[in-house]
Image: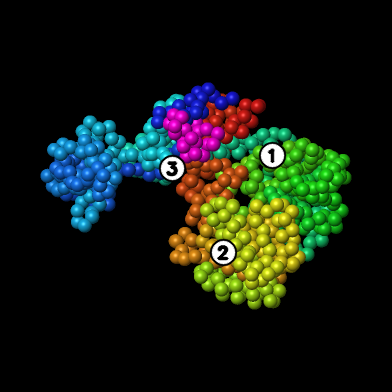
Amino acid sequence: MRPSLLDPLFAPAAALPGIGPKNAKLFDRLLDRPQGARVLDVLFHLPTATLDRRARPKIRDAEPGTIVTFEATVTEHRGGQSRSRAPFKVLVEDDTGDVELVFFLANPEWVKARLPVGATRWISGRLELYDGVRQIVHPDKVMDAEELARLPPVEPVYPLTEGLYQRTVARAADGALKRLPRVDEWVAAETLDKLKLPGFAEALTAMHRPSAPEDVDPAGRAATRLAYDELLSNQLALLLIRARMRESAGRAHVAEGLAGRRLEAALPFSLTNAQRKALDEIRADLRSEKRMIRLLQGDVGSGKTVVALIAMAEVVEAGRQAAMMAPTEVLARQHFERMAPLAGKAGLRMALMTGRDRPAERRETLAALASGALHIVVGTHALFQESVVFADLGLAVVDEQHRFGVRQRLALAAKGQATDLLVMTATPIPRSLVLAYFGDMDVSVLREKPPGRQPIETRAMPIERLEEVVAGLTRALAQGARAYWICPLVEESETLDVAAAEDRAGALRSLFGDAVGLVHGKMAGPDKDAAMERFQRGDTRILVATTVVEVGVDVPAATIMIVEHAERFGLSQLHQLRGRVGRGAGRSSCLLLYRGPLGETAKARIEILRATEDGFRIAEEDLRLRGEGDVLGARQAGAPGFRFARLEVHAGLIARARREAEVSVEGDGRLVGERARSLRMLLYLFERDEAAKLVEAG
């Protein structure tokens, strides 16, 4: 149960001053809480900038282009009848000079009442020079001395949504701060001292009521404190989940390795040193009495699937079953088609299970799984269903892990008794992110590519030279080539992405006829599979696609990758797309079409991509250029959803947060001691409830 002390923070935000029923829906949208924003959401909605009104110069000394606050006397009203479209102007002056205040479409009577001739007022706003005249257009503030005394010298600037104003959000945030309960410190004294961190409440107060612009700086003390709290809660949650999974003792898988050797002998290539090292680590886990929870991360085409298949074979040889789950039907089918012939040579019975199986097929597969006659099943989310019962599931393999949440991978593992878990990702992950996202796992890395993988020539070209690209494509097709043509991302709208792909496919069909295929995320599963199969067989020679082909699709005969509007894609995504070619014996190329002029970030992306095919180096650069949310997909189910921690700024805090979490869990695995109670509070505050409930369940 969440501590009652926190209840005021989980109350509806509509109760805060300035929100009420009228603005509640706007706050729900601003805070991305369709089910209703809470006080906590307002409290955690931090300003991203400030308005610094501390400068109080004389008019003569005021810097144009800056926000200034000065005292002046109103000397003249200029123009502006109430029906006139001309601006109403007010001249104000001090003993060093004058400034013209300009009001467009304002009610002159209101302006005159606010700024009567002869009155002394404090004016605050952005000063500009216009034809040599000092002007402030629509001053932010017009105040008498009493109002000036209440003006914060530094004002927070919040992200807004249409219909909301800064003052409304600031007022609500102030109300949320007043509801913040006094909580015990959860950060170790050594960390507070070493990093010179303020308290939790002090940090939130500094962000919402800044006394200097530095107070809202992501690298500043207040933001660093909140980022550390969030990273600590994340590491604590991952360790508690790991501890709970490890608590149910594993089962040692004792096998001679005969099935694995048969599989290896059936391969048309030798395993790389990296694959052998990963297999040694996995075998050691499988033979241990502890449950395996391991991440296998590899670059595009580094051979993760083969490693997973050999691991599954050894578990089957030890008398148990294995399952592999993929995020899409296309990928599940492809894994099955690639693995089934090899599995057959090793005497392993394997089946495919997706949401599209015919009822008779499904019944047969379910019966064989339940009886133990079926050794390995490959499938999609369909494997989660209650009707899927294993005789004895020993190993669950989850492919493209970042598309599944922790809960989903645990659900698959729960299909067996003490099931070992191997999760895989083809998205190389920067070292700084591995701990943040996969801190509950041991990690194996495949950096080498199997022998025979061809280097890919990467070039960039402005989209204005499209005719040359089409002419080159015509020559390549005449020599038997196959090509992907990836269409641009459009404002994160799948509907618009599909429209762009359909338009490009239509234009190419007018030139190449039926040789052009189309695949996108909105197509029905069977249509998508059919389009992919036609391209794999060579019935179509150009496959126009959205990023649905980014991960896992394997067509060794495809040697050309064209990415339209490459400047709209992230580095890691471009690298994944490029990895769809270079899989066969033929020379491969990747052409990045861009619309200029390129910004600095887009230019850097293209240069890095041309310089290297090392996905791990590319991932580090992508983190530096874009930030952590984009590297793994900001809204993926597997992402911890950081609100404060920006890993391009705060990555250095993760290892410390990890050590501190380990000390807490090792000394008190149930979090019942005095400091542990405050750590539970932290878990609930940062909504790592899953971990908090594990602790309470005992």
Does 262 appear in magenta?
no
Quarter in which the C terminus is drawn: top right
Side of 537 relative to 363 (left or right): left
First reached walking from the N terminus: tag 2 or tag 1: 1
**How many angstroms separate mark 3 from mark 1 (CA)?**
40 Å
Q: Amino acid at mark 1?
A: Leu
Q: Is residue 654 visible?
A: yes
Q: Nearer the viewer, residue 338 or 560?
A: 560
Q: Amino acid at mark 2?
A: Glu
First reached walking from the N terminus: tag 3 or tag 1: 3
Q: Nearer the viewer, residue 335 or 650?
A: 335
Q: Nearer the viewer, residue 348 or 576?
A: 576
Taking 687 as reference, is 309 above or below it?
below
> Residue beneath label 3, please?
162
- Looking at the rendered structure, the secondary structure element under dot 1 is helix
| Numbered mark located on residue 479 in the image | none
Side of 221 relative to 432 (left or right): left
